[in-house]
Image: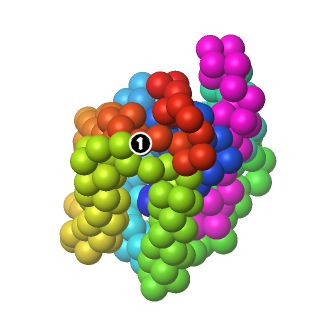
Amino acid sequence: MFIGHFAVGFASKKFAPRASLLPLLAAPLLADMLWPIFLALGWEHVRIVPGFTRFNSYDLYDFPWSHSLLMDAVWATLFSAVYFAVTRYRPGAVAIWLGVISHWILDWITHTPDMPLYPGGGPHLGLSLWNHVAATMTIEIAMLLVGVFLYASATSARDRIGKYAFWIYVLALFLAFISDRFGGSPAPATASEAAHAIFLPSIIAEAVFLSWAWWFDHHRSATGLNFQSSSL
């Protein structure tokens, strides 16, 4: 799942209009933000195997610390607790907790049976949507459209940045999704090679998309409220 995670963050704004889009997006993306770091540290492992699924080439055989259901619950609790301690905004804290957990649910739907319940063993689950390319693309694009609609209905642009930077962002997400699918298969890679290849591009992409979201959201106001969205 890629743009489907962004869709959850966008939709969360409808439930928590005073929260900044930055933490609302960071929540459903958190597992994927931790993953390249844990790969680089050698705590988790992935191989690149062309054709592993019909949608992508990642053999995600070991990532319990970033992607298991138990650890996602831990990360969700920590993230939402810190957010609430800083902002005292309960809807935002709830949206963040649910957003982090949503990552496991959406990945369970898309992945092959590689989603762990907890570190150290146990069953690995997955419904293998990635083996159905048209269905994967249809569901993710539909999710993005719904999420963007909910965000747009919950906010209004205060200036050109709030208007155009938002819609360019949505277009960039869509193009990144299409490019990721049709940009060609990567070369086979061992776990160490894959970790090296994934780390820097992932960190840069996450930093760009999250800071960009904070920027345009800071130029939009929550609809029906007489104050702009929180900076947190």
| Location of residue 75 by image quarter | top right
The magenta span reads 83-112
Measured as percent of width and height from the top left, residue 30 is found at 53, 38
Q: Residue 195 location in percent, x, y?
A: 34, 39
Q: Main secondary structure of the magenta part?
A: helix
Q: Residue at 45% across / 77% down in the picture?
A: 137
Q: Residue at x 53, y 43 (%)?
A: 222
Residue neighbourhood size for the residue with mark 1, other residues' Cα within 10 Å, grouped as few (<14), some (14–19), many (≥20): many
Say left or right for 163 vs 43.
left
State the SS at label 1.
strand
Note whether residue 225 is visible. Answer: yes
Tell me which residue sits at (42%, 30%) in the image: 37
The quarter holding residue 114 reads bottom right
Q: Name above or below for residue 28 compared with residue 171.
A: above
Q: Depth check: 202 or 45 in front?
A: 202
Residue 33, position as x, y percentages in the image? 45, 37
Q: Which residue is mark 1?
A: 220
The answer to which quarter of the image holds residue 226 is top right
- Above or below — where is 223 with respect to 78? below
Q: Is residue 209 left or right of residue 108?
A: left
**Left or right for 220, reference 154:** left
Q: Does 5 appear above or below 45? A: below
Can residue 26 be seen here?
no
Which residue is at 70% across, 60% downward? Answer: 125
The single residue placed furthest to the front in the displayed view is 226
Residue 56 point in image, percent of width and height: 39, 67
Q: Nearer the viewer, residue 77 or 90?
A: 90
Instruction: Please state which amino acid type lies under the numbered disc 1.
Output: Arg
Q: Is residue 93 magenta?
A: yes
